[in-house]
Amino acid sequence: NLSDTRISVTLYNIAINNAQATDTIFSPNQDGREDTTQITAGVTGAVDWSVTFKNSSNQVVGTFTSSQPGTSIQVTWNGKDETDQVVPDGNYTWTINATDPNTSVSATAVSGTISVDNTLPSASIPLPQADATLSGTAAVKGLANDSNFNSWQLHYGQGTNPASWTTLVGTTYTPLVPDVFGQPPIIYNWNTEPRTNGPYVIRLLATDHAGNTFEAKTPVNLYNVAINNAQV
């Protein structure tokens, strides 16, 4: 003899999909570069949701909520806490929670990590020294680094306050650090002879992944002597 019992059920689950931060490193310093990060995700049902930001001590520094059910989540964080103060540099965790308001079914929370970095990269030009007189081919030494280092460039401009810059070394993604003897590296050998004599400025520009930029400038003077139009 056989008997069976059949019960109709409805399966209903909510999932948070494709959750991500548009910028995992940003600098909320109002300089117009990487000032915010955006948390986005999709949801498989119409839900109420919240996005919470916590610091490394697990303290809540920001919360965003929506009570208008929707299937997409989008939050822009400007790096400020609930008292409207910019949070300190460091790592922060964002967490998305979502709940169906009609059934109280909740999705498994999704989280990720972002970094706030308002610290400028370091850059310096140890050689040539400020106000040095250069002739022939002059070695340029430089240092540039940061915990979130991105790139550096080397330029020169004519005059004591250049209105424009000429590139000597284009965008380079390797930090400039001292060698094993503690000496800064030579980053360019500048042939000054084609240039007009007079004041110039050498500029080393460093950037990090948070959009912070720092420039080191060294004023120099070029002086070359040339014999021209010699003939018999």
Image (cartoon, rainbow, N blue to C red):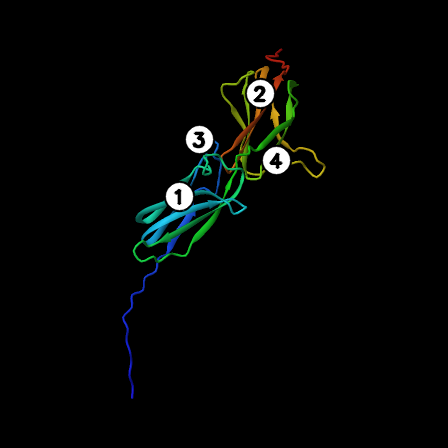
Q: Quadrant of the N terminus?
A: bottom left
The mark that comes first in sequence, 1 or 4, is 1
Q: Secondary structure at mark 1?
A: strand
The amino acid type of the residue labelled 3 equals Gly
Up the image or down, 182 lies above or below 137; here it is: below
Give the percent coordinates (x, y) of residue 141.
64, 29
Q: Which residue is mark 3?
A: 32
Q: Which residue is most to the bottom?
A: 1
> Does the residue at mark 3 contact the one at mark 2 (Cβ under 8 Å)?
no
Q: Which residue is mark 1?
A: 64
Q: What label sits on residue 201 in the rendered view?
A: 2
In the image shown, does 115 or 182 lie closer to the viewer? Answer: 115
Up the image or down, 28 lies above or below 98; here it is: above
Q: Which residue is mark 4?
A: 176
The amino acid type of the residue labelled 1 equals Phe
Residue drawn at (42%, 48%) of the image? 20
Up the image or down, 99 lies above or below 138; here it is: below
The amino acid type of the residue labelled 4 equals Leu
Q: Is residue 37 left or right of residue 140?
A: left
Give the percent coordinates (x, y) of residue 24.
47, 43
Residue drawn at (38%, 54%) of the image? 16
The mark that comes first in sequence, 3 or 1, is 3
Q: In the image, which is nearer the foreground, mark 3 or mark 4? A: 3
Q: Quadrant of the C terminus?
A: top right
